[in-house]
Amino acid sequence: MTATKPLDVAGSLVTGLRIRFEGGRAVQIDADANAEILRARCAFDEGAARLGEVALVDGESRIGKLGRTFFTTLLDENAASHVALGDAYSAPVGDPRDLPRINESGVHIDFMIGSEEVEVTGTTKSGDTVPILRGGVWQI
């Protein structure tokens, strides 16, 4: 997975971020600059290197249309699709029996993965594929 925007981790700018996941865990973290900062954060506890969030954001968001990175997660995560390492929300939509499976960590780091070039495709229970995002536009 490749970040499409730079990431501020405790005052250090991580650029060119690339993360390889296996089984929901970040097993390789590389970047053009400051990868070691994120690697250290992901070693904080057992859940820190696990995938904690996936959020799809289309290209029509008001913040995304500004074409700017604010280096403030609460703004930047509304500009593009993103994922987070570490802690997941403990109030999921859906079945409360999923609560024991939600990742827990003292870390939650969002990084942006969305752009007009990113295509998202879903797979139904029957195995059919359905386009979700194309060119930054919702398809469903």
Image: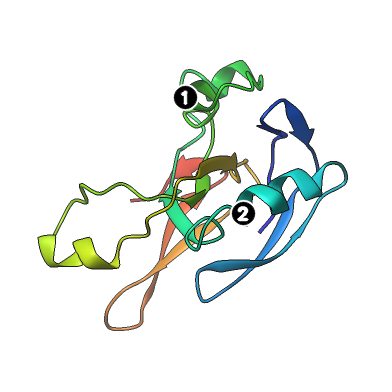
Seen in the image, is 102 located left or right of residue 54?
A: left
Which mark, by number, is residue 99? none
Q: How far across and how far down the image is residue 105, in percent?
A: 43, 52
Screen quadrant of the N terminus: bottom right
Q: Secondary structure at mark 2?
A: helix
Q: Which circle's residue, 1 or 2, is located before the other in the chain?
A: 2
Residue on which the image places disc 2: 42
Q: How far across and how far down the image is residue 95, in percent?
A: 12, 62
- Residue 30 visible to the viewer: yes
Q: Are marks 1 and 2 in contact (CB under 8 Å)?
A: no
Q: Residue furthest right?
A: 32
- Residue 95 visible to the viewer: no
Distance from Cα at disc 1 to Cα at disc 2:
20 Å
How many other residues sit within 10 Å of disc 2, few (<14), some (14-19) or many (≥20)? Answer: many
Look at 54% across and 40% down and name the residue there: 110
Q: Residue furthest bottom?
A: 126
Figure check: 61 above or below 55: above
Look at 47% across and 50% down and name the residue there: 133
Task: Look at label 1 and name its amino acid.
Answer: Leu
Residue on which the image places disc 1: 74
Which image quadrant for residue 9?
top right
Look at 77% across and 31% down and name the residue there: 13
Q: Secondary structure at mark 1?
A: helix
Figure check: 89 above or below 61: below
